[in-house]
Image (cartoon, rainbow, N blue to C red):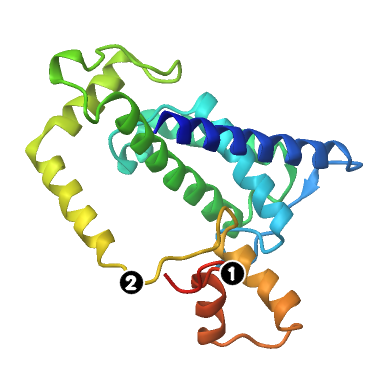
């Protein structure tokens, strides 16, 4: 498991480094456009760079709360605002446009949920209760915020919820196979590269996003 984590970290670092090299080769900040009713840019480079920068800012500046609703509290408004400003400052983007605001909200919402899962996996799962750390493992979180996470993970209600979620995931027959590329960007690539800008049907989209070139449909 440790070896897998190291490999994933190595791959992630390589991707971030490649994206930074691409950015430095451009004359200015990468322009990012997010269309109406889309939560990610359609251009793969834009989508990848946006996700990369948002992830870095999330890891370095955003505390992880027990639930998404707490980011909407009056005391946490500055956290969301700071995240949006830091992400938008990395690009040429209309930060006041509604699609951009919705995209930033989704980036933060999904990102903090993934980070909470990783924290639980690393510092809580499989660890005896008396050995679970009592101080925050992250500089962006206070010890009190960490304690709230641990207390939540320890409740029977949360454990039952996790078990039910695991059962639900096992019922999924066809998993999305777009890799690290966002669904929106993958559809855009398919439309231009595979279908030569012809209108895509729901079947076309499903086949392209759920079929692996190596193993087919799992």
Q: Is residue 148 above or below residue 210?
A: above
Q: Quadrant location of residue 192? A: bottom right
Q: CA distance from mark 2 to mark 1?
A: 17 Å
Which corner quadrant holds the C terminus? bottom left
- Residue 175, numbered label: none
Q: Position of residue 76 (x, y in %)?
A: 40, 31
Q: Position of residue 166 (x, y in %)?
A: 23, 53
Q: How many marks?
A: 2
Asked whether, in this view, residue 112 is left or right of residue 27, the answer is left
Asked if one can make out residue 83 in the rendered structure from this viewpoint, the answer is no
Numbered disc in front, either 2 or 1: 1
Q: Residue at 41% x, 36% y: name it.
A: 115
Q: Is residue 106 above or below residue 171?
A: above
Looking at the picture, tell me which residue is in the foreground, 35 or 16: 16
Element under label 1?
A: loop
Q: Position of residue 109 (x, y in %)?
A: 43, 46
Q: Quadrant location of residue 185? A: bottom right
Q: Which residue is mark 2?
A: 173
- Around disc 2, counting alpha carbons within 10 Å, would you say few (fewer than 14), some (14 to 19), or many (20 or more)? few
Q: Which residue is mark 1?
A: 213
- Around disc 1, counting alpha carbons within 10 Å, would you say few (fewer than 14), some (14 to 19), or many (20 or more)? few
Q: Residue at 11% x, 34% y: name it.
A: 155
Asked if one can make out residue 13 in the rendered structure from this viewpoint, the answer is yes
Which corner quadrant holds the N terminus? top left
Looking at the picture, tell me which residue is in the foreground, 189 or 108: 189
Q: Is residue 4 above or below residue 178?
A: above
Labels 2 and 1: the sequence-earlier one:
2
Q: Position of residue 20 (x, y in %)?
A: 76, 36
Q: Residue furthest right?
A: 27
């Amino acid at each position: 498991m440790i070896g897998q984590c190291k490999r994933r970290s190595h791959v992630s670092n390589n991707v971030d480094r490649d994206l930074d090299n691409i950015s430095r080769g451009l004359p200015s900040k990468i322009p990012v456009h997010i269309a109406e009713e889309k939560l990610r840019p359609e251009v793969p480079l834009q989508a990848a760079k946006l996700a990369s920068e948002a992830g870095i800012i999330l890891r370095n500046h955003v505390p992880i709360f027990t639930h998404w609703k707490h980011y909407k509290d009056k005391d946490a408004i500055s956290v969301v605002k700071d995240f949006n400003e830091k992400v938008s400052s990395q690009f040429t983007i209309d930060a006041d446009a509604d699609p951009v605001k919705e995209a930033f909200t989704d980036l933060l919402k999904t990102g903090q949920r993934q980070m909470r899962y990783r924290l639980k996996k690393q510092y809580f799962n499989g660890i005896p209760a008396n050995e679970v750390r009592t101080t925050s493992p992250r500089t962006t979180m206070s010890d009190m915020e960490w304690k709230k996470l641990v207390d939540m993970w320890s409740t029977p209600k949360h454990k039952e919820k996790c078990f039910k979620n695991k059962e639900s995931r096992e019922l999924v027959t066809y998993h999305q196979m777009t890799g690290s590329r966002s669904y929106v960007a993958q559809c855009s690539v398919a439309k231009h590269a595979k279908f030569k800008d012809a209108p895509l049907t729901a079947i076309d989209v499903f086949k392209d996003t759920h079929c692996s070139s190596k193993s087919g449909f799992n």
